[in-house]
Image: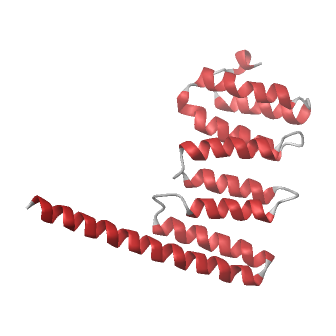
Amino acid sequence: MVKKFGAKSPNVWLNYAHFLHATRNDPDRARALLPRATQQLGDRHSQTLVSRFAALEFRSPNGEPERGRTMFATLLAAYPKKGDLWSQLLDLEIGLSDADPTAIRDVFDRRTRVKGLKPKMAEKWFRRWADWEEKLDPKGKDKVMAKAQEWAVAFKAKKEADAAAAAEDEEMEE
């Protein structure tokens, strides 16, 4: 199948995996495609392939969301600053029919603890978290806003400490 339609196209691999998951009810064969696909396509497409195969685990009737979470955890360990991966994981968690609020909160919380998170991205992330919490419980939004304030204070303190350290280094050089 892959030979006929192009082994160098990531979409062919993904479509075939989707076919095996959804139509053939053979998720094991679909999972076996990922190593073959990454070998064939190389490192350039590996991140995209893994994230889309993980999404397939969430969305497929035969998929295992826990396996998808593990795949995303591996990706996020390698690329912790990739906001699109965090957003994709969050969307998949929220989209589950039996969505677990603690798992969703965990994704929100883990993203805020990533080193190097910029204030603009943090603001958007906290706003999204607050909107989601408000749908569940109006008081939850206040908790998220308190966490956002804590994050902002910690970020400002770290920035000031870095500036003081840079000034101290400059004085020592003179």
Q: Give how far across and how far down residue 152 sits, in percent.
A: 48, 75
Residue occupying the point 60% across, 80% down? 146
Q: Give how far across and how far down residue 136 sits, in percent.
A: 80, 75
122 vs 7: above or below: below
99 vs 56: above or below: below
Tell how many labels: 0
Residue occupying the point 59% across, 60% down? 111
Q: Give how far across and how far down residue 172 sits, in percent.
A: 14, 62
Relative to 124, 108 lies left or right: right
92 vs 140: above or below: above
**Which corner quadrant holds the C terminus?**
bottom left
- Residue 161, image quadrant: bottom left
Q: Give how far across and how far down residue 26 sits, in percent.
A: 89, 29
Residue sticking out furthest to the front: 172
Residue occupying the point 73% across, 47% down? 69
165 vs 148: above or below: above
**Which corner quadrant holds the N terminus?**
top right
The colour scheme of the drawn protein is secondary structure
Residue sticking out furthest to the left: 174
